[in-house]
Amino acid sequence: MLAKKNFLSTFVGSISMIFILYFFLMYLPKTKCNVTFKNHTTNQISNLKITYGDEFTDIDIPTIDTDSDVDLSLNYNKMNSNDDISIYYYDNAGNKRFEELLLSNEKKHFRNIYVNILTIDDAGLIMLEVDKK
């Protein structure tokens, strides 16, 4: 009878610890986000910037060669809770173009952003696809 009680208390304690660990891993705010840019075009891509918050938080994205990747890591702790994450660039006419990567309310749900750069047209407009995980 005593062995059954010990087994039962050990079993319940183990299950409780699993649920506590699951909570901490799944529901605590994420502090870091990895962004991967994949260039699917036949052109080298440069002069892209990641921005969040104000103008002083621009991060230069290194030049992305044809059929290659660039990985960056962003720290959520350096951002305000209401900051969206975007990339921007200038087209051939000098117009500033923005593409949203992650909205402020999505930060706690995603740790990885994959940006597939699909095409660049003659006007310098970039067609891209964003996948969040």
Image: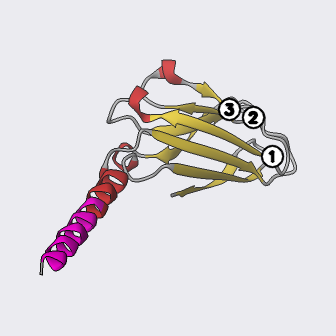
Q: Residue at x 20, y 69 (%)?
A: 12
Q: Residue at x 56, y 43 (%)?
A: 34
Q: 123 and 25: which one is in front?
A: 25
Q: Is residue 81 magenta?
A: no
| SS at badge 2 | loop
Q: Is residue 75 above or below residue 41?
A: above
- The x and y percentages for residue 121 are 77, 49
Task: Give the quarter of the image for residue 5.
Answer: bottom left
Provide the residue designation for mark 3. Answer: 61
Provide the residue designation for mark 2. Answer: 92
Give the main secondary structure of the magenta stretch.
helix
Q: Disc 3 versus disc 1: distance between alpha carbons?
A: 22 Å
Q: Is residue 97 above or below residue 55?
A: below
**Could you tell me if the residues under marks 2 and 3 are in contact, i.e. CB atoms within 8 Å?**
no
**Could you tell me if the residues under marks 1 and 2 are in contact, i.e. CB atoms within 8 Å?**
yes
Q: 70 and 22: which one is in front?
A: 22
Between label 2 and label 3, give the one nearer the viewer. 3
Task: Give the quarter of the image for residue 95.
Answer: top right
Residue 122 badge: 1
Q: Between disc 3 and disc 1, whose residue precedes?
A: 3
Q: Residue at x 78, y 33 (%)?
A: 63
| SS at badge 1 | loop
Instruction: Answer few, some or many: residues within 10 Å of disc 1's Cα (few below 14, many 20 plus, some between 14 and 19).
Output: few
Q: Amino acid at mark 2?
A: Asn
Q: Disc 1 versus disc 2: distance between alpha carbons?
A: 8 Å
Task: Give the quarter of the image for residue 3.
Answer: bottom left
Q: Is residue 123 left or right of residue 8?
A: right
Q: Between disc 1 and disc 2, whose residue precedes?
A: 2
Q: Is residue 70 left or right of residue 114?
A: right
Residue 45 badge: none
Q: Which residues are magenta?
A: 2-17
Q: Residue furthest top?
A: 56
